[in-house]
Image (cartoon, rainbow, N blue to C red):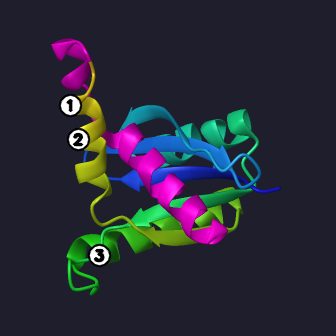
Amino acid sequence: MTTWLALDIGDKRIGLAAGNDNARLARPLRVLVRRSKNEDFEAIARAAQEVGADELLVGLPLNMDGSEGPQAKRTRKYAERLRRRLNMPLRFHDERLTSFMADQILAQKPRKKDRRQPNDAIAAAAILQSFLDAARD
C-alpha cells in the first residue's frame, strides 16, 4: 500500500491532500501560504511525515492541448527540488480541470464563509483522487 501526499503548487499557496491506494480516497489536508523554498519544503516534509507518505504526487498544470507552458515548467523545477530535499519518489499528474472541480465542491458548501476559503487543498485532493481513479482503471 502506498500513501500519497498530493500537492497543488501555486504561485502564492500550496494545497496539500493525502490518501492511499488501498482506500482509494483522497482527503484535503491544508493550504500552505508560500514563503521561502526552505520554509515551504520544511512544512511539506512535516505534512509528509504526519500522514506517513511514501510518495509525492504533484499536479502538473498542462495547457488544454496537453502541452507544457511556463507554469508547468516552474512546477516541475520546484517539485524536483522538493524531491531531492525530501528524498522521496515523485510523480506528476495532469491537473487540468481540478481547480474547476474544487470550485464546484466549494459552491456546494452551505455557508458563504466556507465558500470563500482557498480551494487549493480541495484541488490537491481532486488531483490525487483523479490519479487513484486512473490507477484503478
Instruction: Say if 49 sits above or below 58 in the image.
Output: above
SS for dot 3:
loop
Q: In x, y percent, where is residue 64?
A: 20, 78
Query: At label 3, which amino acid type do we have?
Result: Leu
Q: Which residue is under mark 1?
A: 107
Q: Which residue is under mark 2?
A: 103
SS for dot 1:
helix
Tell me whether circle 2 and circle 3 mark residues in contact (CB < 8 Å): no
- The quadrant the N terminus occupies is bottom right
Residue closest to the far right: 1
**Is 43 displayed left or right of 62 in the figure?**
right
- Residue 44: name its quadrant: top right
Query: At label 2, which amino acid type do we have?
Result: Asp
Does residue 35 show up? no
Residue ID at (49%, 65%) = 79
Q: In x, y percent, where is residue 93?
A: 47, 70
Sequence-first disc among 3 and 1: 3
- The quadrant the C terminus occupies is bottom right
Instruction: Say if 32 sits above or below 99 in the image.
Output: above
Q: State which mark lies toward you, 2 or 3.
A: 2
Q: State which mark lies toward you, 3 or 1.
A: 1
The range drawn in magenta is 110-137
Tell me whether circle 2 and circle 1 mark residues in contact (CB < 8 Å): yes
Residue ID at (30%, 66%) = 96
Query: At label 1, which amino acid type do we have?
Result: Ala
Q: In x, y percent, where is residue 26?
A: 56, 44
Which mark is on residue 62? Answer: 3
Whole-angstrom CA distance, mark 2 to mark 3, is 18 Å
